[in-house]
Image (cartoon, grey):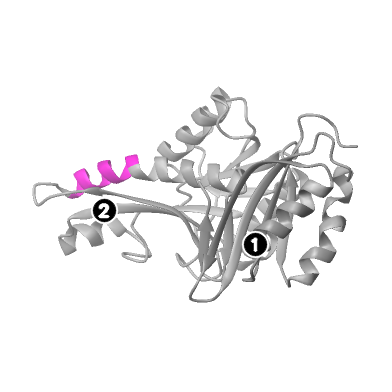
Amino acid sequence: MAEKNLTAILLWSCPDKKGLVSRIAQFIFERGGNILDLDEHVDRSEQIFFLRVAWDLSGFSVAPEKLEETFLPLAKEYSAECSIRLDREKRRLAIFVSKYNHCLQEILWRHELGEFDAEIAVIISNHPDLSYLAERYHIPFHVFPITRDNKIQQESKELELLKQQNIDTVVLARYMQVVSPKYVEKYPHRIINIHHSFLPAFAGGNPYKQAYERGVKIVGATCHYITDVLDEGPIIEQDIIRISHKDSLDDLIRKGRDLERLVLARGVRLHLQDRVLIHGRKTVVFD
């Protein structure tokens, strides 16, 4: 019998068939589970079914450590990809930063308020500038200066630190370095980045300057997972703000900065609450 006040969250995707919601809900009910939240979606173009369901494990007949084993036959029956996580299993985060402080401050502030059910284990930077924020929030701060000559060696040291700290998720909070494929291999769909444009527009470097020179009427920010291809990972969250011909480049940067911190915070929350299902280059986000 599972302990009280424990919640399980199932993420599920498979080829669409009739009765899937009923079958999964009945499977949980038959074992004593009480469903707390359920969202589902069918991608009609590809006929793929997506589901997120959370249920109370009080009185559930399956021990928490046996959940994945119990669901495996059902997943095989429907050729499904699925994962199960318990809400007591707090993720351990590493935040990567450079010199910009706004995204880091937003995450630390919201974490202090209790919005993120996770542990921020370490802050890693290629510059010492933001160590004062880590000290303020009592979080270990590590500096790995990176140059063209030492990048490979420094990244190896960073990855070793992440392993020592048992890091689950990496957040790039305006980290002004392109991480190598080694990171993607170690943390697939667990590296969250904020890009200061409304992707796929103005990918790459200096997007505000690109937007200003193009005379666009909106600027945006995009929170996405990192992949091997720069700025093309599955998108978690986006937002925009209007601008006009009166706005200077500095105005674009100022307005965009507000978007960046809010969009990253929303993206991190969605990831931590297991509300993102990834399908190829796209995501289904249940919020």
**Res. 147 visible in picture:** no
Where residue 37 sits in the image (x, y, percent)? 62, 43
Where residue 204 sits in the image (x, y, percent)? 38, 65
Q: Main secondary structure of the magenta part?
A: helix
Front position in the image: 180 or 218: 218
In the picture of the structure, the residue carrying the numbered disc 2 is: 219
Amino acid carrying mark 1 in the image: Pro
Where residue 60 sits in the image (x, y, percent)? 84, 40
Disc number at residue 108? none
Magenta span of residues: 249-258
Against 150, residue 262 (above or below) is above
Disc number at residue 188? 1
Where residue 195 sits in the image (x, y, percent)? 41, 55
Front position in the image: 74 or 64: 74
**Magenta stretch contains residue 256:** yes
Q: Is residue 25 left or right of residue 177?
A: right
